[in-house]
Image (cartoon, grey):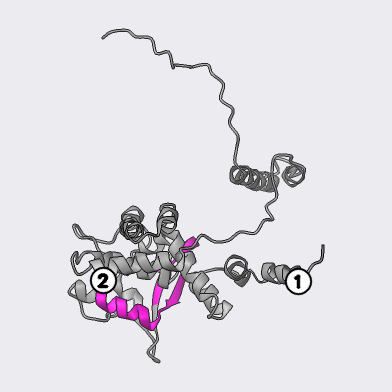
Amino acid sequence: GIRRLNENWRPFMLKESIASQQTLAAMFTALNVFYKFAILEEKTFANFVPVVKKNSPYLVVQSQIKIPDTLSDIQWEYVFGVTRDKCEQVPDLERNLFTLACLKGLYLRISELSERPQWSPVMSHFWQDNDGFWFLRIMGKGNKLRDVTLSEDFVTYLKRYRLYRGLPALPRVDEAEPLVHKIRGQGGMTVRQIRRLVQQSFDLAKQSLLDDGFTDDAEQLESATAHWLRHTGATHDAQTRPLKHLSEDLGHAKIATTDQIYIQTNIKERAKSGLKRKI
């Protein structure tokens, strides 16, 4: 080979690395746990991490209002509607349609639909009680099981998806078919594969939005992720469903978490009380 000098090579250039607030918070948490363990093992006599954290000039205490990332009404209408309309031309998009219905209509995380070592979502996880109400058993964060309620509208799309797969309209208690199937291969789908299905529907919707002149909505859709569908469904239903019911379907350990993210009661009351302030 020929020896050539690379003028852009800077092996000894110092690059300043600035940790994000999330990284700093994680570091303090890890150190706090470490020192608590060290105290139990009698390797140290005190834990100074809380004091250092409180007086740290680098850690910013978060107190701003956080709004969950959601799709607008028109964006969701296009994402779901365009996928549904194209199912006539491309039947395999029925899988996309069902995935969208699960993520938005059941407030699922994308991981809860995917195949995992300790949990494989199958059709028998849909079940019906004696009163005729349908539920879906899900394993969420921390390997916690919960039963999510199914709406009448969702059951309609469940039947549609199962008929497309050549299955009976409603699931049986002993059915081992994967919830979201692979076109090729056996078993359920991974997180990455399901994310691709969602992105495919996002791309179809984006093009249709551009064709219809909704440029801003199309550009905003570029930054959307599959998790936005969970937030979209919960934010929409928070206006009509009891907070406790919504919290249980979302899988939140505390009802205050649901209120803080989707209802924001304290924030709205604070805004109303300050609305008539005089200058």
Magenta stretch encompasses residue 152: yes
Outermost right residue: 279
In the picture as drawn, the residue positioned furthest to the bottom comes out as 131
Indicate the position of residue 79 as horizontal and vertical percent values.
Answer: 35, 64
Q: Quadrant of residue 152?
A: bottom left
Q: Residue at x 60, y 41 (%)?
A: 20
Report whether residue 223 is seen: yes
Q: Which residue occupies 44% across, 52% down?
A: 223
**Highlighted magenta segment, given as a residue range:** 136-161
Instruction: Give the residue type that dot 2 points to.
Output: Ala
Based on the displayed image, in which of its 4 quarters is residue 58 positioned?
Answer: top right
The local crowd at label 2, few if under 14, some if 14 to 19, many if 20 or more residues have their Cα within 10 Å, is some
- SS assignment at label 2: loop
Task: Residue at 67% x, 52% y: name it.
Answer: 62
Depth order, front residue of 76/103: 76
Q: Amino acid at mark 1?
A: Ser
Relative side of 176 to 261, left or right: left
Instruction: Give how far across and how far down residue 212 sits, in percent.
Output: 34, 61
* Mark pair 2, 1: CA separation: 55 Å
Residue receiving disc 2: 176
Whole-percent x and y of residue 106? 42, 72
Location of mark 1 (residue)? 273
Pick the quarter of the image with the N terminus: top left
SS class, disc 1: helix
Looking at this rendering, what residue extends furthest in the top direction? 3
**Residue 144 is at least partly visible in this image:** no
Is residue 159 shown above or below 55?
A: below
Which of the image's four quarters has the C terminus? bottom right
Which numbered disc covers residue 210? none
Of 170 and 224, nearer the camera is 224
> Would you say 69 lies left or right of 65 here?
left
Determine crowd level at label 1: few under 14, some 14-19, many 20+ residues with C-alpha closer than 10 A. few
